Image: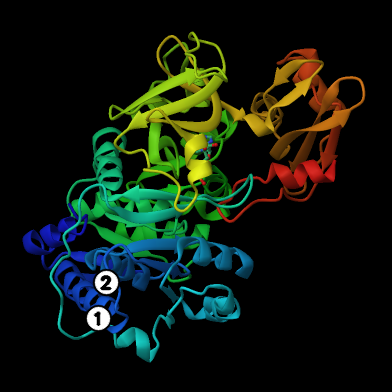
């Protein structure tokens, strides 16, 4: 089944409902979106002689055209290759070449970057800039019918954010996306008919994946006018549309919570903030709930099992009287119903409850493999299980604690130290805004713990205070041997802290 059936369905049952908005103005109803999508699909297929399964890259700063472009690609039976707008031209070149994209649709601000690497992408027939004559000529015209797709056919090549190496294209099928959507509606939140979702985070990644549950409910995809994440714009749009949902990385949640205008958010303006993609510290989520109330749900997933491995529901966030409430807040929740999750040792053997090992996942949401990369696929997919590269352990109630990725684990004196545990403690200090912990080579111990600390605006903190905090909360050997105070932490385009960069600094 082609996932665009959901667009047809919404257009048949709710033709006049708003489908896409720029800021506060409606750009498409479902009727006009489907019409535009089928025109564009015909333009893509006929003008460029593309065949079902051909790849079309999308390099766009968040904009309303990104939504119609994705659906036009799928309508035409093609494969979308969304690229993060903030990538370096060399990274664009890598993805364009690796995916063998035949076309690239981009926004004006990225056109020069894409053109500059065109010579390195032999399969690329054309670059079409949003708003240009070529873009407009993709419609109106003769619409084509919806192309039939098998559920296992690839819809989206999801390039991983590459915090630990070259990005890899997780091949996501229509079935994977359908399963992800149903899991969201069943276990994270069902927003009901015509509900709005704000794409404050890049639509090339998690926020874009979450368009589907809202499309299925004939909801409104709202693109901020700035095309970026601006906390005050986010709050103004939530106040305008009300009942808003959005997906944010934990660092984006923190910016929203700490924004001076946070108190202007009206009750009922935000329905749900789903966070994930990186660690949310207990101190931060508690601050978020104190500020905005019970609007949070967490997901843990990765491009290879999009948005869907475990979830910590809104109800679990609210369960304050539970004796293990804080431990649960520190966890990534329980496995979705549609996936099996195990913890294994390095030989793939199951580990008992409480023991830390690699998280492995199986289910209809799990990718078919990495595009054009059989070696990486064979490493990640074994006997039908996805080896996530993430370390974690289950507690007796089935809540999964995510430890750091195996590459970020510190081994000191032969003992494993998980940086997150130390970061959680440092963040309890009222003057600490952000903290990130890495290992530094040590002749005797192998590695020693070093903490990078960002102090809050106008605040100061002494290493001795942080030391005392650590000694009061965690084993002595885990305490950082050095504190480095920095103005900010290096982050990638999705707001994830780049520990590889921090390790270079020590
Ligand atoms: P990506 O495939 O680029 O979305 O990155 C996925 C990775 O982000 C996962 O493998 C985890 O290491 C991390 N991640 C995702 N969700 C969470 C979460 N809720 N808490 C902590 N880390 C997360």
Label 2 sits on residue: 26
Q: Residue at x 80, y 47 (%)?
A: 486
Q: Nearer the viewer, mark 1 or mark 2?
A: 1
Is residue 301 depicted above or below 395 in this figure?
below
Q: Earlier in the sequence, mark 1 or mark 2?
A: 2
Q: Position of residue 108 (x, y in %)?
A: 49, 81
Q: Is residue 485 above or below residue 70?
A: above
Q: Secondary structure at mark 2?
A: strand
Residue at the (63%, 67%) spot, across then down: 90
Q: Which residue is mark 1?
A: 46
Q: Secondary structure at mark 1?
A: helix
Number of numbered tags placed on the structure image:
2
Q: Nearer the viewer, residue 27 or 345?
A: 345
Display colour scheme: rainbow
**Residue beneath the point at 78% across and 34% down:** 451
Q: Nearer the viewer, residue 493 or 16?
A: 493
Q: Mark 1: give few (<14), some (14-19) or many (20+) Cα within 10 Å.
A: some
Residue reaching furthest to the right: 443
Between the C-alphas of marks 1 and 2, the distance is: 30 Å
- Tell me where residue 275 appears, x and y as whole percent: 45, 41
In terms of image quadrants, where is residue 178? Answer: top left
Q: Find residue 467 and name its label.
A: none
Q: Is residue 351 left or right of residue 305?
A: right
Is residue 51 positioned above or below 394 on the image? below
If the image is split into quadrants, where does the C terminus sit?
Answer: top right
Quarter of the image for residue 468 reads: top right
For image coordinates 64% across by 28% down, the residue present is 420
């Amino acid at each position: 089944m082609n996932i665009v059936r959901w667009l047809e369905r919404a257009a048949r049952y709710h033709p006049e409902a708003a489908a896409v908005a720029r800021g506060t103005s409606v750009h498409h109803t479902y009727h006009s979106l489907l019409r535009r999508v089928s025109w564009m699909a015909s333009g893509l297929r006929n003008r460029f002689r593309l065949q079902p399964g051909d790849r079309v890259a999308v390099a766009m700063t968040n904009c309303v055209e990104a939504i119609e472009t994705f659906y036009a690609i799928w309508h035409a039976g093609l494969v979308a290759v969304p690229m993060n707008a903030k990538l370096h031209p060399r990274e664009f070149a890598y993805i364009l070449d690796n995916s063998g994209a035949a076309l690239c649709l981009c926004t004006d601000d990225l056109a020069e970057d894409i053109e500059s690497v065109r010579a390195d992408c032999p399969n690329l027939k054309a670059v079409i800039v949003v708003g240009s004559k070529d873009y407009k000529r993709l419609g109106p015209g003769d619409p084509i019918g919806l192309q039939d797709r098998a559920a296992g056919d690839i819809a989206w090549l999801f390039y991983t954010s590459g915090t630990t190496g070259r990005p890899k294209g997780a091949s996501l099928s229509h079935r994977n996306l359908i399963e992800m959507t149903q899991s969201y509606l069943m276990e994270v939140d069902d927003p009901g008919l015509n509900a709005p979702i704000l794409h404050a985070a890049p639509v090339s990644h998690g926020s874009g994946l979450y368009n589907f549950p809202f499309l299925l409910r004939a909801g409104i995809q709202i693109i901020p006018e700035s095309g970026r994440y601006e906390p005050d714009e986010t709050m103004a749009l939530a106040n305008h549309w009300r009942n808003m949902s959005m997906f944010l990385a934990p660092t984006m949640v923190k910016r929203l919570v700490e924004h001076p205008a946070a108190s202007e958010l009206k009750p009922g303006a935000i329905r749900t903030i789903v966070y994930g993609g990186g660690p949310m510290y207990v101190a931060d989520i508690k601050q978020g709930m104190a500020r905005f109330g019970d609007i949070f749900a967490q997901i843990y997933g990765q491009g290879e099992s999009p948005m869907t491995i475990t979830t910590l529901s809104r109800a679990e966030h609210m369960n304050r009287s539970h004796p293990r409430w804080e431990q649960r807040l520190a966890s990534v929740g329980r496995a979705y119903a549609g996936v099996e999750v195990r913890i294994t040792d390095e030989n793939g053997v199951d580990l008992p409850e409480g023991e830390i090992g690699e998280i492995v996942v199986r289910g209809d949401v799990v990718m078919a493999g990495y595009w054009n990369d059989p070696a990486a696929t064979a490493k990640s997919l074994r006997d039908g299980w996805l080896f996530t590269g993430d370390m974690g352990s289950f507690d007796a109630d089935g809540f999964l604690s995510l430890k750091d990725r195996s590459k970020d684990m510190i081994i000191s004196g032969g003992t494993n130290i998980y940086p997150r545990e130390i970061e959680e403690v440092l963040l309890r200090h009222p003057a600490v805004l952000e903290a990130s912990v890495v290992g530094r080579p040590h002749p005797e111990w192998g590695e020693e713990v070093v903490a990078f600390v960002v102090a809050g605006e106008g605040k100061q903190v002494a290493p001795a205070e942080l030391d005392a905090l650590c000694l009061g909360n965690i084993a002595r050997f885990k305490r950082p041997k050095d504190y480095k105070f920095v103005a900010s932490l290096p982050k990638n385009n999705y707001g994830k802290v780049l520990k590889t960069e921090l390790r270079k600094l020590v």
